[in-house]
Amino acid sequence: MKRRIFIFLICLFLAVSIFCNLSVAADQQTDPNKYHGSDSFFKTNGISIFWAILKGSEESNSWVFVKIINQEDNLKQFLAFSLIATDPFSDSEEWIIKGEKLKKENIIKLNRESFKKMMGKTFFFYQSEKIEDYQNEMPDMIVYYLSVPDTAPEFLTLEKLEAYFKDAEKRFEKVESTIKKQE
């Protein structure tokens, strides 16, 4: 009798373990159109995102610039985007950009101090040009950042920052063409 109870408990334990592992695995599956843009330059699905900081004498007059480039050969052809700031500790959100038309080049300028409380930034990209209800509209692609990427370069003048953006885009294209040649 004790042996049967022991075997039953072992089987019950294994069944619960398998169930727990399956539920954890299901929770960890990510949306195929959701990307963690952890670096100061990121590219996927025809969208390139570059970050840089214009350094001021103190945080209050330092600016974070984000450049989004919508590639002409973009297969998904995103037409609009939104940007939301999040606080990872309280889960509070603040919409910064609400369903704006996505041009070939888009520059977003954010005060560096705004990252103290609302450090996370999430970009939503839409294939539809007109977004009626941006808060409930399902985006076609999401790129999220936990904060300003550590690799974002800092510049003392706007001219140097703009030159960096132009140069970074060219260097990124060279790396991509080299990778394609090696394939």
Image (cartoon, rainbow, N blue to C red):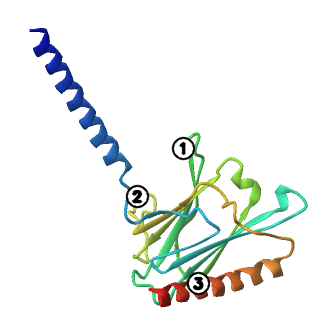
Q: Which structural element holds mark 2?
A: loop
- Residue at the (37%, 60%) spot, across then down: 31
Given the image, on which type of amino acid does mark 1 rest? Answer: Asp
N-terminal of the pair, mark 2 or mark 3, is 2
Q: Which structural element holds mark 3?
A: helix
**Side of 140 relative to 172 (left or right):** left
**Side of 24 relative to 171 (left or right):** left
The mark found on residue 91 in the picture is 1
Residue extending farthest to the front is: 3
The answer to the question of whether label 1 and label 2 lie on touching residues, with beta carbons closer than 8 A, is no
Q: Which residue is mark 3?
A: 175
The mark lying in front, picked from 2 and 3, is 3
When asked about the image quadrant of residue 20, the answer is top left
Q: Which structural element holds mark 1?
A: loop
- Vertical order, 45 against 174 (above or below): above
Given the image, on which type of amino acid does mark 2 rest? Answer: Asn
Q: Gap between marks 1 and 2, in whole Å?
A: 17 Å
Q: Gap between marks 2 and 3, in whole Å?
A: 37 Å
The mark found on residue 136 in the picture is 2
- Circle 2: is it few (<14), some (14-19), or many (20+) Cα within 10 Å? few
